[in-house]
Each structure stands twice: as C-alpha cells, then as structure tokens.
Image (cartoon, rainbow, N blue to C red):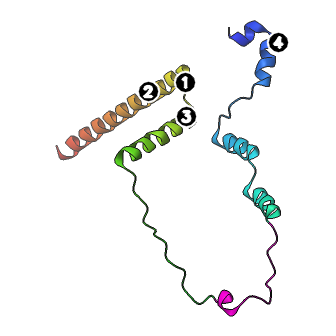
Amino acid sequence: MSDSDATGEKGQDREAKRTSRPVTAAARRERRASARPTGKTSAREADKARPAAKASSSTDTAETAKKGRATPKRDRRDKKPSPLARLVRFIREVWAELRKVIWPTRKQMITYTTVVLVFVAFMVALVYLLDFAFRKGVFWLFG
C-alpha cells in the first residue's frame, strides 16, 4: 500500500496539485516550449523598446557617409584557459547533464536487467544451435 492510498483523498489532492515530471522527450520539449517565450516575441518587444533611427540630415559630410575603407581587424585570438579551468568547466557541464537524466527506479532497473540477460541467453543459445547445425552439415557433406 502506498502513502497516497493510506492518506485517502488528501493525498490525492496533494498529488493533483504537484506537477508531474514529463516521461517522454516530446512531453519535456512541449513543457519547455510552453514555459519559455519564443524568440520572435522577445525580438518584437526589443524592437518596441528601441528608439527610432535618426533620419539622415544634410549636415552629414562626405567623409562620414563614405564606406570605402576596410573595417579594422580585431584581435580574434581567444585566450586558452588553463588545463585546470578546462577540467573544472568539463566537470561542471557533466554534472549539469547528469541532472537532466531521468534515472530509472529500482524496479525498472531490475526489469531492464532481466530482459537483457534473457535476450543474451537466447542469442547465445541460437548461435550455439546454428554453429552445431552447420558443423554437422559440413561433416556430413565433406565427411
């Protein structure tokens, strides 16, 4: 008997109020999409917040309007972080990915392990039987 069965209706009300975690990847994507605004909406809001561009005036000189010169190059060489900093970043990213994993329960793990072991035993038996049949066939044929 689970805790929700023992508490009766109060336990069911608590479970109904609590949001359940999506089980499938599609359900998780849908939940994430409904929780976050899309990029188009935020871009429209950003456009509203931006002031209107100034109209070009007749006081602009030919030098400022000229676009013939090359853009100066930037120093694009990124500083490579130290090995310790890269290791720390790697571990932090691994930890973040492991938090996203939906871990199986003990019952699910036992079920999955049993299924795998039964399948492996079946495949071993199948390969053994095929090997035995081919060996007998070759000895019969070539004698």
Q: Position of residue 80 (x, y in %)?
A: 39, 56
Residue 9, which numbered label?
A: 4
Q: Position of residue 126 (x, y in %)?
A: 37, 34
Question: Is disc 3 in contact with disc 1, using a CB cutoff of under 8 Å?
Answer: no
Question: Is disc 1 in contact with disc 2, using a CB cutoff of under 8 Å?
Answer: no
Residue at mark 3 to residue at mark 1: CA–CA distance: 19 Å
Magenta extent: 51-66
Q: Position of residue 8 (x, y in %)?
A: 79, 9
Specify which label sits upstream in the sequence, 1 or 4.
4
Between tags 3 and 1, which lies in front? Answer: 3
Instruction: Kindly identify which residue carries mark 2.
Output: 118
Specify which label sits upstream in the sequence, 2 or 4.
4
Question: Relative to 64, is 2 above or below?
Answer: above
Between tags 2 and 4, which lies in front? Answer: 4
Question: Relative to 36, is 1 above or below?
Answer: above
Instruction: Kindly identify which residue carries mark 3.
Output: 99
